[in-house]
Amino acid sequence: MENKIIFLILFLFTLTLIFAQNQIYLTAGVITYNDVYLSWVDSLETNDITGFEIYRDSVLISAISNPNIFDYFDYALDSNLYSYYVVALFDSLDSVISNVEYINVTLPAPMNLTGTYNPPNIILQWDSPPFSRDLNMYNIYRDDEVIGQAISTFYLDEYVPPGWLRYYVTAIYDGGYESGPSNHFYNPSDVDDYEFAELRTELIGNYPNPFNPSTNFSFTLARDDFIDLSIYNLKGQKIISLVNDYLDKGYHSLKWNGIDDYGKKVESGLYLYKLKVSGESDLVKKCILLN
């Protein structure tokens, strides 16, 4: 009996040494912004492994029944700090837990924010993040306070108060998670000799899109000019001309309620809207009407 007890103690001590010296070693890293790649090394030197369990923030996210698989992709994560560990499963032994790895996932911010002072308004424009994940909208900040939201990469801050102002934009992704800030744009609107960004002639877009029953088309003009903004079907036939006139430089917005030149409601579908400036350059974008 005494010999059996001694043998059991030695056996348990040996197992303790094995599991203290030989572990599942986990490494983790972020790929493509918000996808995490996990890989681990099995140094247990046993053939009893039946599989692995993957845990994120102490919650099981995957069970791998193949003992020869040693990596895992955790896709499309929201912006957050995550902890990971792997558990090795055995037929006849207790499970073994790997080291814990911490990963900070951040979502890309809008880029190339610029501003134009068109008294008394500020026109902000930026580029969307280089990212394919669903993006709900943008938050626009002035002096660290949210002053508005936008679907397109354009925002008009009307009746700007005097003084030095600091703007930046963040992206709001699906799930409500917010990116970090874009670059900053500073506007000292009460300083006469400040050189503001040059206003561009640009067809900004329409909102909402798709739309029902109406949408607004926004564009900017770099100078006073004669313009034509018209809607076309996919056959190239003109549906309606929203404006065909001389307009001042600056920001403009025109509404379309889905009717043609004869006042008749047009059918649901894809339409093109074209901005022609001085009868020369054509700027074209698409819109979708849903009746």
Image (cartoon, rainbow, N blue to C red):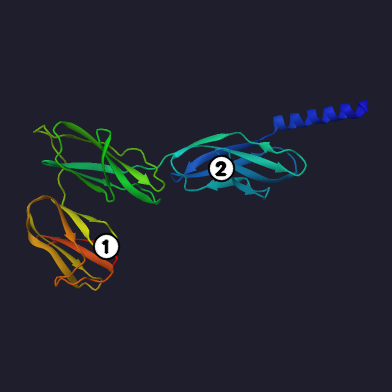
* The C terminus sits in image quarter: bottom left
| Residue marked by disc 2 | 38
Which of the two marks, 2 or 1, is nearer to us in this view? 1
- Residue at 88%, 27% in the rendered image: 5
Q: Is residue 7 left or right of residue 141?
A: right
Q: Is residue 162 left or right of residue 58?
A: left
The kind of residue on which mark 2 rests is Leu
> For residue 222, which numbered disc appears in the image?
none
Disc 2 to disc 1, how far (Cα)?
46 Å
Residue 171 picture quarter: top left
Residue 282 picture quarter: bottom left
| Residue 267 to residue 287: above or below | below
Q: Are marks 2 and 1 in contact (CB under 8 Å)?
A: no
* The N terminus sits in image quarter: top right
- Give coordinates of residue 155: x percent, y percent: 22, 46
Please rate how many residues cluster around mark 1, counting C-alpha atoms within 10 Å: few if below 14, some from 14 to 19, many from 20: some
The kind of residue on which mark 1 rests is Asn
- Residue at 15%, 38% in the rendered image: 160
Q: Nearer the viewer, residue 219 or 23?
A: 219
Q: Nearer the viewer, residue 87 or 214?
A: 214
Q: Is residue 3 left or right of residue 200?
A: right
| Residue marked by disc 1 | 212
| Residue 9 to residue 125: above or below | above
- Give coordinates of residue 101: x percent, y percent: 55, 35
| Residue 252 to residue 212: above or below | above
